[in-house]
Image (cartoon, rainbow, N blue to C red):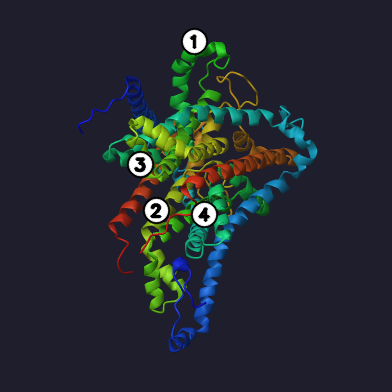
Amino acid sequence: MAQQKHVSLFRQAANHAASFGAAASAFLVLAPLMAIFGYLVFKGIGSINLAFLTHTPKPVGEVGGGMANAIVGSMFILFIASFIGVPLGIGAGIYLSEYGKSRYSTLVRFTADVLNGVPSIVIGIAAYALVVLKQGHFSAMAGGVALGIMMIPTIARTTEEMLLMVPYAVREAALGLGIPQWRSTLSIALRTARSGVITGVMLAFARVAGETAPLIFTAFGNQFWNLNPNQPTAALPLQLYVYAISPFDEWHRQAWAGALILIVLIVVAVSVVRLATRRGSFAGSH
Amino acid sequence: MTTVGGSGANVAPIELPKRVQRIALKTSFMARMTDTGFRYAMLACSFSVMVIVGLLLFELTSRSRLSIAQFGFRFFTGSQWDPVAGEFGALPFIYGTLVSALVALVIAVPLAIGVAVYVTEMCPRSIRGIISFLTELLAAIPSVVYGLWAVFVLAPILRDYIEPFLERTLGWTGLFTGPKLGLGMLAAGIILAIMIVPIISSITREVLVAVPQHQREATLALGATRWEMIRMGVLRNARAGILGAVILGLGRAIGETMAVTMVIGNRPEIAKSLFAPGYTMASVIANEFSEATDDLYLSALVEIGLALLIVTLIVNTAARLLVWSITRGTPQRANG
């Protein structure tokens, strides 16, 4: 370049200011993340012990006790939720990618995106009206229904996206071999897109695993063990909330421990599945 | 149905020889039935999404009928919330929801757009992935954990350092006066801002990436600096989508429950100062729903939920339309 670029001082300054501003905002956004994680680990690690992981809560004023029933309760509710949300979500995703050219499919896509933005507490009210009022009492089932509903839109949209990434030639090859379309969809297309679909499921799972608002008046919470879907059940985020707003130091300590466990469970679940699917240990034969 | 659906739109149908057609038509009845059955099963799954939204609207409307009949529109203008006297007006909650969401947007929007611009246009390729991953991680933290952190870390910092500073410098506006508790509208707004930055920035990023590369090249060719290229070539073309991202963030802020409930102070009052405690629509449901004893009380709470649902449906519809106008709603199909 022989010609020298002439850029006025003001424009240069504006350029540098903008670059600095953007980099600074990146830092400002990540600072709270560091602060939250750092504080969580710092406060939580000291409070986690064997009793915390194996005992049920002690009455107010007594030291000790744990959240074992809440951890198991959370998993139980999430199991019910996945039972509802995963098949419906994947099915909807299959429909959108394999048959989804109509105006109806656009409407479904749109509704799914909108449903994704509905506040979780509103879905909790609906689950209360649909399950709790019909049963006459709070239950793990109601909590599972609320969380299951919340999983559907995320799973449907990622499944669609992942299936569309499978080249159509793969399906045509299957159909050319005389394989019926449903088999080609399930055993060829879905199987090829599997790792992406699983990631989508895990993202939905991680999102609802920490949900508290819809559980307050569905699963309700419980001081004891429960694995009956028709009974109120403790859940980790719920227990955490109750402990956090309580005035007792011992409960605050346990709330930090619970929060750390919750975060670790979520992060571990997501990264394990990501790693496993990336390395292809699920791939290959049955 | 002997033709193959899907991407076949641009492929001309092939006329098969008679002999092959006869073989093709021999597909057994059972095979055709399972294919049709599978298709309808998947259709049913996709229809469940519509059913859910319908059910939400129906259940919430029918369960709030009592309160709608009793108060009518007065419900949204009255500021008296007295379960004992059976008097319910939701104005303080609406005010709290709007103000806390507004504070959150004022803080979050510039930051989120800044991050998105930094990641897509400026930062070295090597740290691009790390920053997006960390921002996404911010979205994976449960609301209740944000709340816990806000109660024990953010609120004391606000009370001891930030609120006194704001009162000294901006106290004359009337927005930053009164007793400094840490907990209150300002704390709620800040924690909401932290929570909605990921969604705004990730969708803004999606929109910025969708802006054609020619736009950037063209502005640079005209002699623009990098910032001018971003301002004229990128941001201006993406503004509808960015607006959509901001509105989506607003929707999240309006519906966010737990973290806000833990820090906003939960008092149904309308105060000008941001230091004062407030109450939001979502928090009042979270706090009082399982204790609501009589039917009118419960019905009033469900009506707040219904209002929340309708507002978020409208907000999200508008936002999605804006974002779709830039990125297209349908994901791209792979070629091959």
- Residue B300 locus on image (x, y percent): 71, 38
> What residue type is disc 2 on?
Thr
Q: Is residue A31 left or right of residue B281?
A: left
- Which chain does tag 1 point to? B
Q: Is A107 located above or below residue A218 in the figure? A: below
> What residue type is disc 3 on?
Phe
Residue B168: mark: 1
> What residue type is disc 4 on?
Ile
Residue A246 shows up from this direction? no
State which quadrant residue B255 falls in.
top right
Q: Are marks 4 and 2 in contact (CB under 8 Å)?
A: no
Q: Do labels 1 and 3 share a chain?
A: yes
Residue B133: mark: 3
| Gap in angstroms between the C-alphas marked 1 and 4 | 49 Å
Under circle 4, the secondary element is helix
Of the two numbered discs 4 and 2 on the same chain, state the one appearing first in sequence: 4
| Gap in angstroms between the C-alphas marked 2 and 1 | 50 Å
**Near-viewer residue (A253 or A122):** A122
